[in-house]
């Protein structure tokens, strides 16, 4: 039973692997796909809704691991560079750094355990979606901005 519980975070990623996505953090899709032999990975693996500033329990683990690295802000700044070629190179460099940090963090994240109840409350069970009120509570708790 303990081995099943330890394996649940991996299963959560696999469950969301059937969905498609496009986001600034596309750099992490390939490492997730390769690590768990998935077909694809969705933003839903880390985010419960459209507002990408809100993270589910799995995403919060990466957010904590990436704290202080400012990946999103740096990627957005690279996108806005006047020299588009330099911006592209900067974005690629940030992506490589993200993958290195992901590979460090995921080893520790895989050691954590979640109960079935925690999976459900995080919206990580396959075929389930959180109620909008729950996502709103997550947004408020995490101090994420309201996207209109």
Image (cartoon, helix red, strand yellow):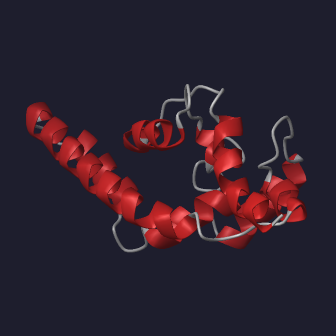
Where does the image place residue 36, in percent across and percent down from the top left?
54, 41
Can residue 147 be seen?
no
Q: Quadrant of the N terminus?
A: bottom right
Q: Quadrant of the C terminus?
A: top right
Q: Quadrant of residue 13?
A: top right
Kindly identify the residue that appears in the image at 71 percent across and 44 percent down. 49
- Seen from the viewer's position, the closer of residues 146 and 13 is 13
Can residue 93 be seen?
yes
In-image side of 91 versus 117 (left or right): left
- Seen from the viewer's position, the closer of residues 121 and 5 is 5
In-image side of 82 versus 114 (left or right): left
Q: Quadrant of residue 44?
A: top right
Kindly identify the residue that appears in the image at 33 percent across and 47 percent down. 76
Q: How many labels, in total?
A: 0
Kindly identify the residue that appears in the image at 51 percent across and 65 percent down. 63
Q: Quadrant of residue 34?
A: top left
The image shows residue 39, relative to residue 142, as above or below, that is: above
Where does the image place residue 100, in percent across and percent down from the top left?
30, 57
Where does the image place residue 57, in percent across and percent down from the top left?
69, 62
Where does the image place residue 130, in percent across and percent down from the top left?
85, 47
Kindly identify the residue that appears in the image at 64 percent across and 50 percent down. 10
In-image side of 108 versus 116 (left or right): left
């Amino acid at each position: 039973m303990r081995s099943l519980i330890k394996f649940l975070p991996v299963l959560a990623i696999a469950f969301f692997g059937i969905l498609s996505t496009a986001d600034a953090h596309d750099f992490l899709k390939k490492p997730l796909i390769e690590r768990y032999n998935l077909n694809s990975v969705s933003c839903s693996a880390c985010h419960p809704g459209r507002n990408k500033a809100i993270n589910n329990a799995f995403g919060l683990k990466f957010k904590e691991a990436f704290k202080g690295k400012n990946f999103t802000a740096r990627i957005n700044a690279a996108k806005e560079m006047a020299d588009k070629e330099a911006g592209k190179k900067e974005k690629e460099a940030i992506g490589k750094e993200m993958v290195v940090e992901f590979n460090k963090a995921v080893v520790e994240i895989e050691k954590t355990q979640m109960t079935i109840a925690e999976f459900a409350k995080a919206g990580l069970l396959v075929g389930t979606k959180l109620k909008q009120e729950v996502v709103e509570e997550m947004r408020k708790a995490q101090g994420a901005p309201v996207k209109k």
